[in-house]
Image (tube, helix red, strand yellow):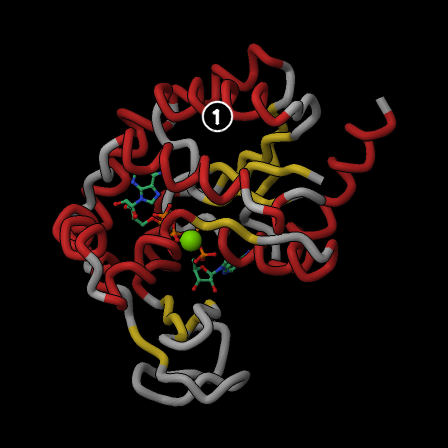
């Protein structure tokens, strides 16, 4: 299975990607998680990326395309993958089509998750992440608070620096200006499907699998 999870910040791409990666035993490739790992390691990329991410802007296309090219060329991506957060510009989408061509990948699906704006703001202001394994939580729906241990691995739960309200607003603007046009690109290729992200996590997961099954049957 090769799947691209698409949609604005906070719609649940990471949440769904982790579930599907576990169910289908394929890697979850989140460009945001890869950048946050580089920030945590203090690499040159991480130092540069942190400034951009904290401003709610996009890391340059050439850097992101290089990262994704390396991951998709690695042996672990041979049996399939779930891309989360890439592509985010038309340039990235065109580069991905070229990478797929080089790798002989002909079939893939794009899942666009749709959620109301107010719900996005609500979800991001109450999101917590585990510093150790990147698991995603929510203080509104789960019994967790910032600084407490991850129920799964004991790592510290924290709020992402880019989940501050002013940064969230900027990320949404960037999504609408630079990222949403990518949807049309995939509609034209006939691989785009939309799923209602307002449903529960479990129902969104079931609906994604239904969509994938019917796409496979065609
Ligand atoms: P990235 O980490 O990809 O952030 P994003 O796209 O803004 O998306 P989020 O991770 O914020 O949201 P999500 O959709 O994963 O939602 P989640 O599952 O966590 O990118 C961060 C930054 O890195 C970018 O701003 C940019 O600077 C840079 N970057 C990354 N990729 C790049 C690229 N390709 N090019 C250039 N720059 C790049 O869920 C959110 C919350 O909602 C959680 O609390 C969760 O528990 C809850 N939730 C999820 N689903 C449900 C549900 N169905 N019902 C109720 N609550 C739910
Ligand atoms: Mg995410």
Query: At which x and y percent is residue 8?
Result: 39, 40
Name the foreground residue: 4 vs 214. Answer: 4
Residue at x 67%, y 42% (from the top left corner): 78
- In the picture, which quadrant includes the N terminus? top right
Query: At which x and y percent is residue 90?
Result: 37, 19
Left/right of residue 120 with respect to residue 105 in the rendered view: left
Residue at x 61%, y 45% (from the top left corner): 77
From the viewer's perspective, is residue 136 above or below residue 201?
A: below
Q: Quadrant of residue 112?
A: top right
Residue at x 65%, y 56% (from the top left corner): 21
Name the foreground residue: 117 vs 189. Answer: 189
Q: Is mark 1 within 8 Å of ligand 1?
A: no
Query: Which residue is at the far top?
Result: 188
Q: In which quarter of the image is residue 79?
A: top right
The residue where tag 1 is placed is: 96
Count of numbered tags: 1
Residue at x 59%, y 35% (from the top left corner): 111
Query: Which residue is at the far right?
Result: 217
Determine crowd level at label 1: few under 14, some 14-19, many 20+ residues with C-alpha closer than 10 A. some
From the viewer's perspective, is residue 101 above or below residue 73?
A: above
Query: At which x and y percent is residue 178?
Result: 29, 25
Element under disc 1: helix
Left/right of residue 165 with respect to residue 35 in the rendered view: left
From the viewer's perspective, is residue 104 above or below residue 200?
A: above
Query: At which x and y percent is residue 84?
Result: 49, 45
């Amino acid at each position: 299975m090769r799947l691209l999870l698409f949609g604005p910040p906070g719609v649940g791409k990471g949440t769904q990607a982790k579930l599907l990666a576990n169910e289908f035993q394929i890697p979850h490739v989140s460009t945001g998680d890869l950048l946050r790992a580089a920030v945590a390691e203090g690499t040159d990329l991480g130092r540069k990326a942190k400034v951009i991410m904290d401003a709610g802007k996009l890391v340059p296309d050439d850097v992101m395309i290089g990262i994704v090219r390396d991951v998709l060329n690695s042996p672990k991506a041979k049996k399939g993958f779930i891309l989360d957060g890439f592509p985010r510009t038309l340039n990235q989408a065109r580069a991905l089509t070229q990478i797929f061509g080089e790798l002989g990948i002909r079939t893939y699906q794009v899942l666009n998750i749709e959620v109301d704006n107010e719900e996005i703001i609500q979800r991001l202001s109450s999101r917590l992440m585990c510093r150790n394994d990147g698991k995603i939580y929510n203080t509104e729906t789960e019994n967790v608070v910032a600084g407490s241990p991850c129920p799964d691995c004991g790592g510290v739960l924290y709020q992402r620096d880019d989940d501050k309200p002013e940064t969230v607003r900027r990320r949404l603007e960037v999504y609408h200006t630079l990222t949403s046009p990518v949807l049309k690109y995939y509609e034209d290729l006939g691989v785009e499907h939309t799923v209602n992200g307002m449903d529960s996590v479990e129902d969104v997961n079931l609906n994604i699998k239904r969509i994938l099954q019917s796409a496979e049957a065609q």
